Amino acid sequence: MRNPWLKKNRVFCDVMPGANIIKMIAEAIRLSAANENCIITFEFNGVTVNVSFDSKPELIYRDWLRAINGYIKKNIGPYPNPVLTDEEKANDDRIKAENERRQQERQAAYQAQATAKRNAVEAKLVNAPPMEVSDEEAWQEFKDKNQDSYGRAIVTYAERWARLMQAEMTTGRQIEEVAEATSREADLEDITGFMHGAAVSILAQYWKYGEQLRRWHNLYSQLGNEGELANESGCVLNPAVLNLQARDQ
């Protein structure tokens, strides 16, 4: 039951990046009590949350989860029903089942697309020569030192990318013409921006055509003139961290 002394005024609060919903609810309740028991309203992940000093935090959180999952409208509180009705439970279960079905369909479609892409890339590389390295011994030593899952994924991606570029270059095309498209084609590991920059650094150091790739990458990635500066200094620009990484790091 609503508190008869509840004030009708409302305060809208901003949510800071990285905030936690449970902590936000608790903070909103504290703010309500500190501001003459007004309604505190904030938006969290697309859901408008209304909280009073006497709101039940566990019920606010319950309905926030329900709103996030599409069971109810994305405007909740400050006084959710303490107990869901059988009709509400049945509706939640129906929507949950539908969400799971759609998620399974999306996952199946994604997996089919990923498998088709992998098969196409592997077929393209069947007759492609190995990556042309500048120092075979140093390259093998580098690979041996990067056998953890993260490092191995970057090395595998870099090597596959180099081979795809080499295949395109046999037709007379230049690195600058094929690097962008083949970088996406070579990505079978869901490479992040940072990992892509690391792959460029690897190829710049060990691939026969690495210097040409490095210079293209720096100019392609720059927002101002940082790519030009990186080319002059012998570094590789990693746009994921807006930082210049020396080739020997």
Image (cartoon, grey):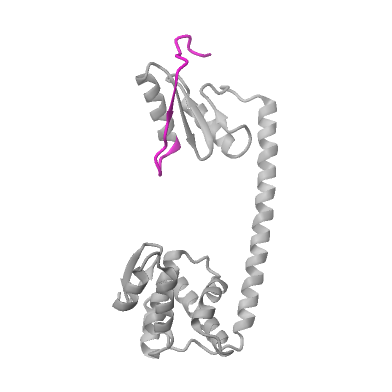
| Up/down of 141 relative to 197, above or below | below
Displayed quadrant of residue 205: bottom left
Quick check: 246 left or right of 10?
left
Q: In the displayed image of the protein, which residue is found farthest to the top? A: 4
Name the residue: 42% across, 39% down: 20
Q: Position of residue 118 (x, y in %)?
A: 61, 73
In the rendered image, is residue 148 in sight? no
In the rendered image, is residue 227 in sight? yes
Quick check: 192 left or right of 103?
left
Quick check: 129 left or right of 202?
right
Q: Quadrant of the C terminus?
A: bottom left
Name the residue: 68% across, 60% down: 109
Q: Is residue 116 magenta?
A: no
Number of marks present in the image shown: 0
Q: Position of residue 208 (x, y in %)?
A: 42, 88
Name the residue: 48% across, 12% down: 3
Q: Position of residue 126 (x, y in %)?
A: 61, 86
In the image, 199 versus 220, the foreground residue is 220
Displayed quadrant of residue 220: bottom left
Q: Is residue 13 magenta?
A: yes
Q: Main secondary structure of the magenta part?
A: loop
Displayed quadrant of residue 148: bottom left
Name the residue: 40% across, 64% down: 223
| Up/down of 188 relative to 132, above or below | above
Q: Position of residue 4 (x, y in %)?
A: 48, 9
Q: What range is drawn magenta here? A: 1-21
